[in-house]
């Protein structure tokens, strides 16, 4: 089991960019399918993006397609979420997690574990 630590959040203006990082401990990071989720105040945790262990497949929720890019660097044991054209509705705490299901991704957070502590992203209008 890997341990995950998110970073890179902060305050951005609408239309701006941020790059989130998810640093993993352990030598087996490269074997894991990974996901990004977010949770706004008073709302349920929401799927954002996923990347297959090999890095050759990605999947995004519709609201971030064309604006966010998920990637990974196994040599650095790190996954990234590049967020461009940010909108106020992107404001949330962002989490990364490892996928534990039978496919390579799911939108249900219950199919993930190893959650990090989250990083706050705030987008002002």
Image (spheres, rainbow, N blue to C red):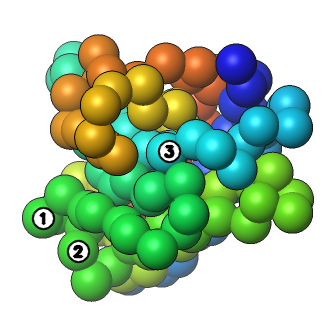
Query: What is the C-alpha distance between the residues marked 1 and 3?
Result: 18 Å
Q: Quadrant of residue 88?
A: bottom left
Residues packed near mark 1 inside 10 Å, few (<14), some (14 to 19) or many (20 plus)? few
Q: Nearer the viewer, residue 8 or 124?
A: 8
**Measuring 34% from the left and 46% from the top, which residue is drawn there?**
104
Q: Earlier in the sequence, mark 1 or mark 3?
A: 3
Callout 2 secondary element: loop
Left or right: 87, with 113 as reference point: left
**Measuring 33% from the left and 27% from the top, which residue is drawn there?**
101
Callout 1 secondary element: helix
Q: Earlier in the sequence, mark 3 or mark 2?
A: 3
Indicate the quadrant containing the N terminus: top left, top right, bottom left or bottom right. Answer: top right
Callout 3 secondary element: strand
- Which circle, 1 or 3, is nearer the viewer? 3
Residue 13 in sight in this render: no
Residue matched to label 2: 65
Query: What is the C-alpha distance between the residues marked 1 and 2?
Result: 5 Å
Numbered label attached to residue 105? none
Residue matched to label 3: 34
Q: Nearer the viewer, residue 87 or 58?
A: 58
Q: In x, y percent, where is residue 43? A: 19, 23
Indicate the quadrant containing the C terminus: top left, top right, bottom left or bottom right. Answer: bottom left
**Measuring 86% from the left and 31% from the top, which residue is drawn there?**
26
**Measuring 64% from the left and 44% from the top, which residue is drawn there?**
31
On screen, residue 51 above or below 100: below
Residue 57 in sight in this render: yes
Mark 1 vs 2: CB contact within 8 A: yes
On screen, residue 77 above or below 56: above
Residue matched to label 1: 62
Residues packed near mark 2 inside 10 Å, few (<14), some (14 to 19) or many (20 plus)? few
Q: In x, y percent, where is residue 124? A: 39, 60
């Amino acid at each position: 089991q890997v341990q995950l630590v998110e970073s890179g959040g902060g305050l951005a203006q609408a239309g701006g960019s941020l790059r989130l990082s998810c640093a993993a401990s352990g030598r087996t990071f490269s074997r894991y399918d990974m996901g990004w989720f977010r949770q706004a105040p008073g709302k349920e945790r929401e799927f954002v993006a996923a990347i297959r262990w090999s890095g050759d497949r990605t999947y995004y929720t519709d609201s971030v397609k064309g604006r966010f890019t998920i990637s990974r660097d196994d040599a650095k044991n790190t996954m990234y979420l590049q967020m461009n054209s940010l909108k106020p509705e992107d404001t949330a705490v962002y989490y990364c997690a490892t996928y534990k299901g039978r496919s390579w991704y799911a939108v249900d957070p219950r199919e993930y574990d190893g959650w990090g502590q989250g990083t706050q992203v705030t987008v002002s209008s």
